């Protein structure tokens, strides 16, 4: 697990906007606590809730894309981002 840099922390409310499509705060909490196919979004608890970093989001999306490409035989990172974000 990478250590999150304090200077890079982004509260979840703002982190929602760093995804290709808006995701709900509940989805982010689920990805942090339970993960997606065994891949968790790295985050820490701060006084106002939870926070992550742009780097952690990129890592999460890349790992999900790699996981999906192994399962489905060739999904790109962009396709994985769109799939994660949903309609």
Image (cartoon, rainbow, N blue to C red):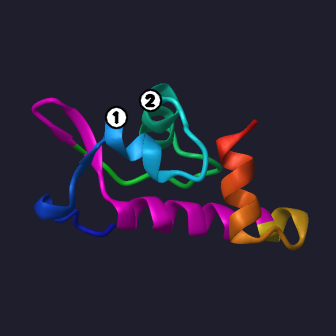
**Label number found at residue 25:** 2
Residue 29 located within the stretch drawn in magenta: no
Q: Quadrant of the C terminus?
A: top right
Return the residue nearer the eye: 39 or 51. Answer: 51
**Label number found at residue 3:** none
- In the image, farthest residue toward the right: 73
Return the residue nearer the eye: 15 or 52. Answer: 15
The residue stretch that appears in magenta: 45-68
Number of the front mark, 1 or 2: 1
Residue 64 located within the stretch drawn in magenta: yes
Return the residue nearer the eye: 75 or 13. Answer: 13
Main secondary structure along the magenta-highlighted residues: helix
Q: Residue at x 51, y 30 (%)?
A: 24
Say whether disc 1 or disc 2 marks the residue closer to the N-terminus.
Answer: 1
**Which quadrant would residue 54 be assigned to in this image?**
bottom left
Image coords of residue 21 (percent x, y): 61, 45
Q: Residue at x 70, y 65 (%)?
A: 78
**Which quadrant would residue 51 be assigned to in this image?**
top left
Q: Residue at x 37, y 67 (%)?
A: 55
Q: Specify whether 50 is left or right of 65.
A: left
The kind of secondary structure element at disc 2 is helix
- In the image, farthest residue toward the top: 26
Q: Residues within 10 Å of mark 1 (few under 14, many from 20)?
A: some
Return the residue nearer the eye: 53 or 34. Answer: 53
Residue with the mark numbered 1 = 13
Labels 1 & 2 near each other (Cβ < 8 A): yes
The kind of secondary structure element at disc 1 is helix
């Amino acid at each position: 697990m990478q250590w999150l840099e304090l200077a890079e922390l982004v509260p979840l409310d703002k982190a929602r906007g760093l995804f290709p499509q808006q995701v709900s705060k509940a989805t982010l909490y689920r990805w942090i606590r339970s993960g997606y196919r065994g891949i968790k979004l790295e985050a820490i608890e701060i006084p106002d809730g939870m926070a992550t970093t742009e780097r952690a989001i990129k890592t999460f999306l890349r790992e999900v894309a790699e996981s999906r490409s192994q399962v489905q035989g060739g999904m790109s990172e962009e396709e994985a981002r769109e799939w994660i974000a949903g309609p």
